Image: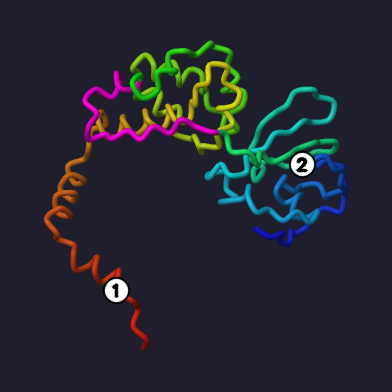
Amino acid sequence: MSSLPVEIESSQLIKVEIMGKVYEVPTGLTMLQAMWYTGYELLRGAGCLGGICGACSTTYRTKGDIKIKTCLACQTEVEDGMSFSLVYTYYPNRKIPYDFDAVEDPKQDLFRFYPEASLCRNCDACTEACPKGIDVRTGVWEAALGKFKDCSEKFLPCVMCSLCVPVCIADIAPNQIGLYVRRSQGIFFNERPPQLLTRIEEIKEGKFESEWESLLAPVQDV
């Protein structure tokens, strides 16, 4: 994504460090907007701009604080003296190609697909790293204990930014476990409304084939 024009509402400038270089930028900008303002061309690290896709995962420090924090750059305003960098590195996740049609007991199969789920050390680093404020540690424990409903509700805001992955001392990918649990909960445990089941059967029977073909048909020149 190329650099984009940024509408400036403030004339007050503050100093921020972006990727190791100090710039002066107006107050009120998000981290992404500050990068565009200073001329960065983002080929990776910008997506929905609404805090949903998780593409702009970022590490940062604030002035006078030694702690490294995490956030989504499209949702976090710059502060004077802040230092930040987008996480351009992809953290390798264990993406297990499970097939739910072959899963008989999703709670037990969790340990077949992700045996490390039971190795959580309670360090809480994953929760600290989550930019969406998810209680990740508790969610992982709930998954391991078979509390899929509670776990799936906790991980509902997860945007798969993977910031929880590199901080785990047990080499767990909590976001992948949360995704498996959410899918399992929807497939095996949530009650399906009757109208949904009816519509699924209608689709299987081909009731909407003509409408589908019409939607897929090439647009005719008028």
- In the image, what residue type sits under mark 2? Val
Amino acid found under the numbered disc labelled 1: Ala
- Picture quadrant of residue 98: top left
Q: Which residue is mark 1?
A: 217
Residue range in magenta is: 92-110
Give the vertical position of 12 relative to 114 (above or below): below
Classify residue 12 as left or right of residue 222.
right
Q: Nearer the viewer, residue 83 or 96?
A: 96
Specify whether 144 is left or right of 211: right
| Quadrant (top left/top right/bottom left/bottom right) for the N terminus | bottom right
Residue under pointer 2: 78
Q: Residue at x 49, y 26 (%)?
A: 173
Residue 87 drawn above or below residue 94: below
How many residues crowd around disc 2 within 10 Å: few (fewer than 14), some, or many (20 or more)?
many
Q: Give the residue furthest to the left.
A: 205
| Total count of labels | 2
Query: Residue 52's spot in the image, x, y percent?
Result: 53, 44
Q: Residue 4 at what x, y percent from top left?
A: 71, 61
Q: Is residue 123 above or below residue 47?
A: above
* Front-most of residues 181 and 116: 116
Graded by Cα atoms within 10 Å as few (under 14), some (14 to 19) or many (20 or more), the crowding at tag 1 reads: few
Q: Residue at x 86, y 54 (%)?
A: 11
Q: Single out the residue that lies furthest toward the bottom.
A: 222
**Residue at the location (79% across, 31% down)?**
62
Residues at marks 2 and 1, CA–CA distance in whole angstroms:
48 Å
Instruction: Confirm whether residue 3 shows in the render.
Output: yes
Is residue 84 toward the left or the right of residue 25 in the image?
left
At x 77% / y 30%, what residue is drawn? 61
Check disc 1 and report its element: helix, strand or loop.
loop
